[in-house]
Image (cartoon, rainbow, N blue to C red):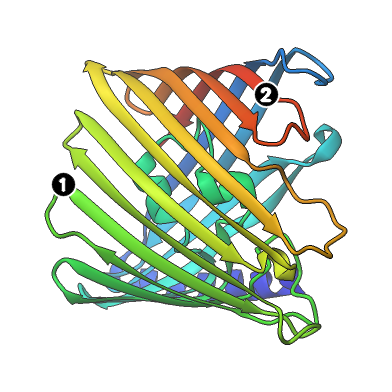
Amino acid sequence: MVNRKIGVILVLGVLVGGNLGAQEGLKLKPIVHMFANAEYNPSEGVSKDYSFWLGRMLFGFEGQFSSKWSAKVQIDRFRLENSVNTMYVKVANIRWTPNDRIAVEGGVILQNDFIPFEKFYEYRFVAETFKDRYYGIPSTDIGVAGYFKPWKNLTVDLALTNGEGPRIEQDHLGELKLAGGLTWNPIEQIQARAFYSLKPSVIRPGDQEQLFTSYVGFRSGERMRAGTEFTYIDGYQHLPVRTWGTSTFAWIKLYKGLKLLVRYDDIIWKKSEDAVYAIPNSGNALITGLSLSPVKGITLCLNYQGFFTDFNLVPDSHRILFTFEYRI
């Protein structure tokens, strides 16, 4: 089902793009983004201390057909368990922008959930943002989204999506996901955002997953950037579970392309008294490192990532990574 939908989207994109491109000329921009890690992990219970792994390989194109129509296609290579590599269509959308206050896109689209904070954070290649790392929420999904700018400093976004992510077919008993957000830039240096999503369940109509998240960030040109994000989920994956947490980061430019990154996460899980399933452990994470950009498009980062559990259900973890990113 999902593959057929993606195929239809791609065909429509080619037809629309071909017509518009024939009229005004097609402009293509390549997308390449990859990062890899060399890791030393002395934590208790790990299978090997040293490893090398490819974190992401994204490639595709952005096409500008006219002043109002554009499209994007991205393929994502990722790793399953037992080091089995596979690929899927991460993004395949068509975007209509009639003016500078309205934009509508459909297809396999970016979910406007943690992506805005991820772009502000700028260190996804070192560590995923909070919801991506601890909840595994997909960054894209099949659906439609609208972006509206009623005032100069305020943007409103609304989305209706499949709810499962592009790698999973929509369950015949599942419901669609409704989402909406507000992004406010009171001044150039400050960005604030609030986001809410609702994902009902047909199997148990009373059970629904509700997510609320907000963040505020401050930047001073390319000299420094800092932000804090709060997330609360009631009914995670339609289970009687509540979870919430915060993530706070800062990076500062020390000298030319050299930057210092510091991040602290705090996550809490609560389940109902009669729940018999296992849930992840509450705890705190510390991420810190030094990054260097010797040339445009290439970034290196030597970093430490530690997770400290609250209840000792699993051992604490300590990892030292040398991370490499390349993008155009």
Q: Residue 22, position in %: x, y? A: 37, 71
Q: Nearer the viewer, residue 175 or 72?
A: 175
The mark nearer the N terminus, 2 or 1, is 1
Q: Residue at x 52, y 41 (%)?
A: 266
The picture quadrant where one finds residue 202 is: bottom right
Q: Residue at x 42, y 47 (%)?
A: 118
Nearer to us of marks 2 and 1 is 2
Q: Is residue 324 above or below residue 138?
A: above
Q: Amino acid at mark 1?
A: Gln
Q: Residue 297, position in %: x, y? A: 38, 28
Label 2: how many Cα within 10 Å (few below 14, some 14–19, many 20+): some
Q: Are marks 2 and 1 in contact (CB under 8 Å)?
A: no
Q: Residue beneath label 1, please? A: 189
Residue 39 in view in this figure: yes
Q: Residue 318, position in %: x, y? A: 64, 19
Does 259 sit left or right of 209 as displayed?
Answer: left
Q: Residue 302, position in %: x, y? A: 48, 15
Q: Nearer the viewer, residue 64 or 136?
A: 136
Q: Amino acid at mark 2?
A: Ser
Residue 29 in view in this figure: no
Measured in 3D between alpha carbons, the distance from the residue under mark 2 to the one under mark 1, in whole angstroms, is 35 Å
Q: Residue beneath label 2, please? A: 317
The picture quadrant where one finds residue 200 is: bottom right
Q: Secondary structure at mark 1?
A: loop
Does 142 sit left or right of 297 as displayed?
Answer: right
Q: Is residue 234 above or below residue 41?
A: below
